[in-house]
Structures are given as C-alpha cells and as structure tokens.
Image (tube, rainbow, N blue to C red):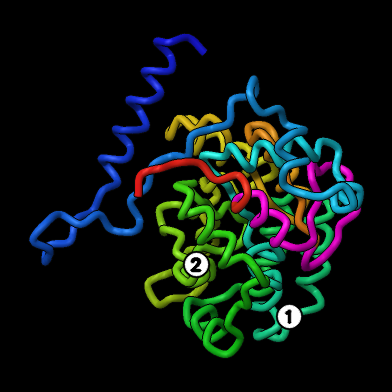
Amino acid sequence: MSAATAMTTSAFRVSRLLTRQRFSPTSSSATLLSHSRVFAAPFSSGTKPMMSIMNDTFDSDKIASFAGNDVSGAIAALANANAVCFDVDSTVIQEEGIDVLAATLGKGPEVAAWTAKAMEGGTKFEEALAARLDIIRPSRKDIERCLEISPLQLTPGIDELVMKLNERGVDVYFVSGGFRLMIEPVAKEVCVSKSNIFANTILFDDEGNYAGFDATEPTSADMGKPRALAKIKEENGYETMVMVGDGATDAQAKPPADAFIGFGGVIVREAVKEKACWYVTDFQDMIEVIEKNSFSKLK
C-alpha cells in the first residue's frame, strides 16, 4: 500500500469513528457510548504471516483437527476483519426460523423439506422461498404469535462472539434469507443494529394479512448474499470481510467475502463443509482467534 493510500485509509477510519460517536446528554463531559467504534488495525502480512497467526492461536493437535480448504487464510482474515457477516438460521440461532413459523401454523414437515433443499443447494433459493411462503401465507399476527410461544434460541457462544467483535471495533452484520420481523428481536438480544440486518421483508395488506414478499431485497434470490456483501463492502470501504454460515447460499458469498467460515454447530451440511475455508462446529474457536489476536484501539 502506498503512503498516500495509507493516509487516505486512515483518514477514512477516523471519519467513520467520528460519525459513529454518540454522547451522553446527562454527562458534564462528553462520554463516548459503548457502540462507538474504530476499526482494529490489521496485521501486516510482512511481519506476521497467515500461518503464524494460526500457529500462535492454536496448538498443533487442535490445528490437526481443523477442516477447510484454506484454514490459515480464514483465521488470518478473521483476525484482520473490519466486518463479519453472519447467517442467522442454524448459525446465530439453533433452528430455521421459517420452519419454526411453519410448525406453529401446522405446516412444519412440508416447509422443512423445502428448507433442506434450499440449504443444501438443491434448488434456487427464490423458488424455495416463494414455495414455502405460499404454503404458510403468514399474517403479521401469526409471526407475532410464533415469536411469543416459540422464541428463537441463540446458538451457544454467539452472544460472546458478537460481544468480542464489538469490543474489537469489528462491525457485525446479519445477512439472512430469513425474515426481518423474526430476526430483529434476535439482533437486539446480541446488540446488532437494525441497520446492519439484510433479510427478507414479508408484505402485509392493511388488515395484516399476507400479501407476498419484497422481491427487491438482495437476499430474496439465489446469489443474493454475494450482492448484499458487495453492497456492504463497497459502501463502508471494508478491507477485510468474513462470512459465517451453515448453508450453500453462505458459501456463495466468497467473494466478495475474503473468507467463508462454515458453521456446523447446529447441522452439518457436507456440501457446505467442502466449500468452507475453515469449518467450525463451536463458536469458541472463533472467539479464541479474536481474543488472542487483539490490537490496540481507542478505549
């Protein structure tokens, strides 16, 4: 990177920090609130190679157990990340949200079959989405009732992982083929902003009855996650972005993601495991990368 480019990047980061600052109106001195962030400084590949990052983080036995087609590269990307994007269903949460919704409406098995095909890559996502919604046709009240009687369950470790990323100044996004109305409460629980959610929007008529879905959302169609990540990366100027998820649509997101970390802590999909740069079944492995590769940042 040239000196001019480095200066431009530095100025950009400072500008983003200033625009993110929020101050307490009750404090006599302006107090920076916890959601103000500055990007963590990336590793220099010339001083700490990718393999060194992995070897410094895990012991040899642990490394030997890892699966993936570019494990050291994925670990380095996570250590360097300015942004990490998570799928939600079967990654952030322990179930597929649409399957939970279908079950409360008595359409569980029929919808679950379509979900499995979509996640394994056996059908185009937009076809599976339209078919499942046509089966259940959920009203606004149906969704509210579902979340009341069957609240979505966080996957163990995700809350700590998101907290560690936030502490490091890494921006966290939820990029999901699920439904915004069901994801927003989950995002709130782990302190991810609504503005950092890319998901599908169910449409309702004036009486709250199902009226279709917004086909302009990038995640409503096959290859939608790469489009969403490209938009996120371009608009924010991220240097290093990582995608984490359990499904075929998540694997599609590299590129523009610099690494795809496959997650099998809820369900293992062999087709996804084969495409993952690094395949993990426990978020603790990712937490260790963040904890053991910390950088100085504004307090």
Q: Which mark is residue 190?
A: 2
Could you classify mark 1 by the number of other residues whose Cα lies within 10 Å: few (under 14), some (14-19), or many (20 or more)? some
Q: Amino acid at mark 2?
A: Val
Q: Which residues are magenta?
A: 265-290
| x 45%, y 52%: residue | 196
* Membership of 282 in magenta stretch: yes
Q: Nearer the viewer, residue 153 or 231?
A: 153
Residue 59, percent across and down?
82, 50
| x 65%, y 37%: residue | 77
Residue 53, percent across and down?
70, 37
Direction from residue 3 to residue 30 in the image, left or right: left
| x 37%, y 32%: residue | 13
Residue 249, percent across and down?
72, 47
Secondary-structure class at tag 1: loop
Q: Which mark is residue 93?
A: none
* Membership of 295 in magenta stretch: no
Compared with residue 95, is residue 255 higher up or lower down, i.e. above or below? above
Mark 2 against mark 1, which lies toward the viewer? 2
> Which of the marked residues, 2 or 1, is nearer the chain's N terminus?
1
Kindly report the distance in space between the C-alpha atoms of the residues bearing marks 2 and 1: 30 Å
| x 63%, y 32%: residue | 256
Query: For mark 1, what is the residue?
Result: 107
- The furthest residue to the bottom: 149
